[in-house]
Image (tube, grey):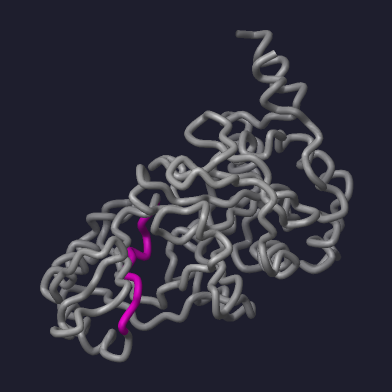
Amino acid sequence: MFGIAKRLAAAGVLGLNERNAELIMRLNPRHLYPRVDDKALTKKLALEAGMAVPDLYGLITNQGEVRNFASIVAAHDSFVIKPANGSGGDGIVVIAGRSKRKRDTFRLGNGMLVGEDDLKHHISNIVGGQYSLTGNPDTAMIEYCVQFDPLFGDVSFQGVPDIRVIVYRGYPVMSMVRLPTRVSDGKANLHQGAVGAGVDIATGKTLHGVLKNSVVEEHPDTGSVIAALQIPGWDFILESSARGLEVSGLGYLGVDIVIDRNRGPLMLEMNARPGLNIQIANRSGLSHRIKRIDELYDANDDPVKRAQIARREFAAPAVAFRSAAQA
């Protein structure tokens, strides 16, 4: 066991305890957590910083406002309902359209129909705190439903893939695409069974994937090869992610971005405690990249400069993480 730990450390693999002690506790002051834990506040700050985000149709902040739901969505056939302080995708409902015969009946992303009263009941549960990180009363957000980009059509099951970028001291250091599967119920959540595919920071092309803790080459539902997909707007994605430092004030965070087929890259949310499976997806450890940023760090670098440095420094991973772990 000690031999494996030693080889992983030599490969630059960042461990959970090291992440918590050396990155999160040191770089992420707790008083700044609401800037990323509260998705409504994150969206407001991101808009003020000029970032592209899904349009917000409305907020429901208490039980009395649940009755406003119909008027908020009156002009929209598709939309997303989510808890502002939720995590892991819990409580998110995607409405893909309306019934052709009844406008108060909605079609979910999986094709099932639900009534307006069902959605009001769900919103009431959100407001009551059922999906809140803290269990406290929450806010229900109703926003634009991202339209699936055909790029990921062959490597995704139902839901919308998203792109996670790890940002250290304002510099993007590692990225992966999270691909929904049947097991994850169409959600881009690795803990629920989605596939994570590493991304070459220099080019924006996908690498190999990881399902749970196993490396995979093909999507489990479609059988399509995961590697070598060119993510559109990659320069913009890196620059937007780098801007996450100014928006959140956090020195270590994950920035999640989706690709809309009409509007391009949109920032979905940020995370103050991003997981570490991204290292397996990239077959590369974070520690070496973090050390390199510490050597290069310049407080005067703006987001564009920081993104340029990331592209220059972190080309396709050369460290065979999997081999090191299994050697």
Answer left or right for 207 relative to 308: left
In the rendered image, residue 172, in percent from the top left (x then y), is placed at 72, 54
Nearer to me, 201 or 211: 211
Position of the N terminus by quadrant? top right
Residue visible at 48% across and 68% down in the picture: 148
- Number of numbered callouts drawn: 0
Residue visible at 68% across and 8% down in the picture: 3
The reply to whether residue 137 is in sight is yes
Residue visible at 29% across and 77% down in the picture: 97
In this rendering, the answer to whether 236 lies above or below 7 is below
Asked if the stretch drawn in magenta spans residue 83, the answer is yes
Residue visible at 72% across and 57% down in the picture: 204
In this rendering, the answer to whether 162 lies above or below 22 is below
In the rendered image, residue 95, in percent from the top left (x then y), is placed at 30, 71
Position of the C terminus by quadrant? top right
Quarter residue 225 falls in: top right
Asked if the stretch drawn in magenta spans residue 127, the answer is no
In this rendering, the answer to whether 252 lies above or below 279 is below
- What's the magenta region? 77-87
In this rendering, the answer to whether 238 lies above or below 147 is above
Residue found at the far front of this picture: 223
